[in-house]
Image: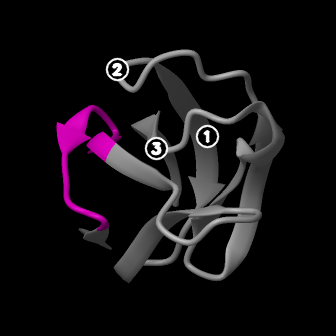
Amino acid sequence: MIVKIEASVYCNIIDAENTAYRLYIDNDLYTERTFVWNRRDTYIEECSYADLEPGDHKIRVESCKIPNGFVLKDIRVDSKSVSETFTINT
């Protein structure tokens, strides 16, 4: 089933050399981005489409260099608010 996944990516690092992140859905890499973050309240709105089987899934973000450098907020699947772990129903 193809679903639309959206999330706001916030950075905990204000350092131009350490601002790359990767966004995963389950164990699949969906995007890798580098961005110049000038404030902690700046965020990127990610939007991806994924072909997911019914069942439990997880979305996560990780820094390419520094642990805990990024956080996901306002996660939505098909416009419905979910947590980082979510379920796709048939």
Which residue is more in the foreground, 82 or 15? 15
Judge left or right: residue 36 versus residue 89: right
Q: Which residue is mark 1?
A: 48
Q: Amino acid at mark 3?
A: Ile
Position of 13 relative to 79 (above/below): below
Q: Inspect the magenta stretch and tell me whether residue 82 lies in it.
A: yes
Q: Amino acid at mark 2?
A: Asp
Position of 77 relative to 43 (above/below): below
Q: Quadrant of residue 74?
A: top left
For the C terminus, give its image quadrant. Answer: bottom left
Q: Which residue is mark 2?
A: 41
Nearer the observer, disc 1 or disc 2?
2
Q: Residues within 10 Å of mark 3 (few under 14, many from 20)?
A: many
Q: Which residue is mark 3?
A: 5
> Could you tell me if residue 89 is visible in this image?
no
Judge left or right: residue 1 versus residue 34: left
Q: Secondary structure at mark 3?
A: strand
Q: Which residues are magenta?
A: 73-84
Q: CA distance from mark 3 to mark 2?
A: 21 Å
Judge left or right: residue 73 versus residue 14: left
Nearer the observer, disc 3 or disc 2?
2
Q: Secondary structure at mark 2?
A: loop
Residue at 46% across / 65% down in the picture? Answer: 59
